[in-house]
């Protein structure tokens, strides 16, 4: 038997899902006159799900002791949830069936460490359920940062995304990627409702970054699968990488991220530049890159003719 969930978790998730759907989008007749709430009302969700209003209200308030899978499926269908959101709803409604409270750090098994070491042409990394960075290969260190040189508590992709200034420069589409990180943490939180370290991380990021706090309150969830990202790196300029996300068998709370690149493309050349990176030359290389650009600009300026004078000899 499940136990009551924290009221705000399931309440805010269902409320934000209701708010994004209009009656017309849900297949209901248009409502005449002003509406006091954005999106669907509770009674409209209950109508669409085929349950009583009182039953749905109790569900939204976190009283999930006797809720059935059929009712949750009906609510998910009424709110037009995708598969990730549906799984999130089921986890919120059944916290007793999720992972127990966890305080120990996750570890990468030796075989996965060897996998990362053997991948040399593209970045690869292994993340834990709190987005802790468990392992990276050489190119991932060059792309992001030397996570292994940080204290254990700071090796976290969400911390990097929101608290490291260079992250906003690295991702050309930073808001999109940052929101995905928030959605991953939201999704993991529903499967680990009693993990104090996850709750502490979310609290610290909410307090430390206004964007994180705003997106965290929206209760969106995200499960990485595949796609592409655009980067602007101080050592390799602009390039684009594809990515594929995998869940290692036997370690369902971990995500193996592998990047891909188009053969013969400028992005592949950019990765070759990144491959020359070492921890000791990070500052030097980036400083030299900036100085090279500045020197080129000064040289170009000096070669320009003075205002009012032509390029040839005057009469």
Image: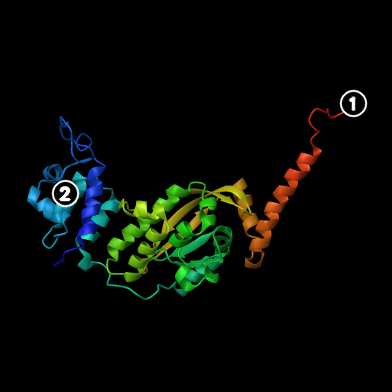
Residue 201 is marked as: none
Residue 74 is marked as: 2
Image quarter in which the N terminus is found: bottom left
Question: Measuring 32% from the left and 58% from the top, which residue is drawn there?
Answer: 187
Q: Is residue 299 left or right of residue 23?
A: right
Q: Give the Cα separation between the discs numbered 1 and 2.
A: 85 Å
Residue wearing tag 1: 314
Location of residue 132 by image quarter: bottom left
* Mark 1 or mark 2, whichever is nearer to me: 1
Residue 17 lies, in percent from the top left, at: 25, 47
Q: Name the foreground residue: 132 vs 39.
A: 39
Q: Secondary structure at mark 2?
A: helix
Residue 205 lies, in percent from the top left, at: 40, 60
Dot 2 alpha-carbon crowd within 10 angstroms: few under 14, some 14 to 19, many 20 or more = some
Q: Among all residues in the image, which is located at the extreme bottom?
A: 104
Q: Is residue 185 left or right of residue 94?
A: right
Give above or below for 41 relative to 249: above
Question: Measuring 62% from the left and 49% from the top, which residue is drawn there?
Answer: 237
Residue 142 lies, in percent from the top left, at: 58, 60
Q: Earlier in the sequence, mark 1 or mark 2?
A: 2
Question: Measuring 70% from the left and 48% from the top, which residue is drawn there?
Answer: 293
């Amino acid at each position: 038997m499940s136990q009551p969930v924290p009221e705000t978790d399931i309440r805010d998730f269902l409320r934000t899902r209701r708010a994004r759907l209009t009656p017309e989008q849900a297949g209901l007749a248009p409502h005449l006159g002003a509406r006091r709430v954005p999106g669907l009302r509770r009674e409209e969700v209950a109508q669409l799900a085929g349950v009583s209003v009182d039953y749905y209200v109790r569900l939204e308030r976190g009283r999930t002791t006797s809720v059935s899978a059929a009712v949750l499926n009906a609510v998910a269908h009424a709110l037009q949830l995708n598969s990730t959101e549906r799984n999130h709803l089921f986890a919120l409604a059944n916290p007793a069936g999720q992972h127990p409270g966890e305080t120990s750090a996750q570890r990468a098994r030796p075989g996965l460490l060897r996998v990362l070491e053997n991948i040399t042409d593209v970045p690869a990394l292994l993340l834990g359920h709190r987005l802790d960075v468990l392992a990276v290969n050489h190119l991932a260190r060059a792309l992001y940062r030397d996570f292994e040189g940080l204290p254990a508590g700071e090796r976290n992709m969400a911390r990097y995304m929101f608290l490291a200034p260079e992250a906003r420069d690295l991702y050309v589409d930073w808001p999109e990627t940052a929101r995905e990180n928030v959605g991953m943490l939201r999704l993991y939180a529903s499967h680990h409702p009693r993990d104090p370290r996850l709750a502490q991380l979310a609290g610290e990021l909410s307090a430390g970054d206004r964007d994180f706090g705003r997106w965290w309150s929206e209760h969106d969830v995200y499960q990485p699968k595949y796609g592409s990202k655009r980067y602007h790196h101080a050592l390799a300029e602009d390039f684009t990488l594809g990515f594929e996300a995998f869940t290692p068998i036997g370690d369902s709370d971990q995500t193996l991220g592998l990047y891909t690149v188009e053969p013969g493309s400028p992005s592949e050349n950019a990765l070759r530049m990144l491959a020359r990176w070492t921890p000791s030359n990070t500052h030097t290389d980036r400083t030299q890159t900036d100085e090279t650009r500045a020197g080129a600009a000064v040289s170009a300026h000096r070669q320009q003719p003075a205002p009012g004078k032509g390029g040839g000899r005057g009469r």
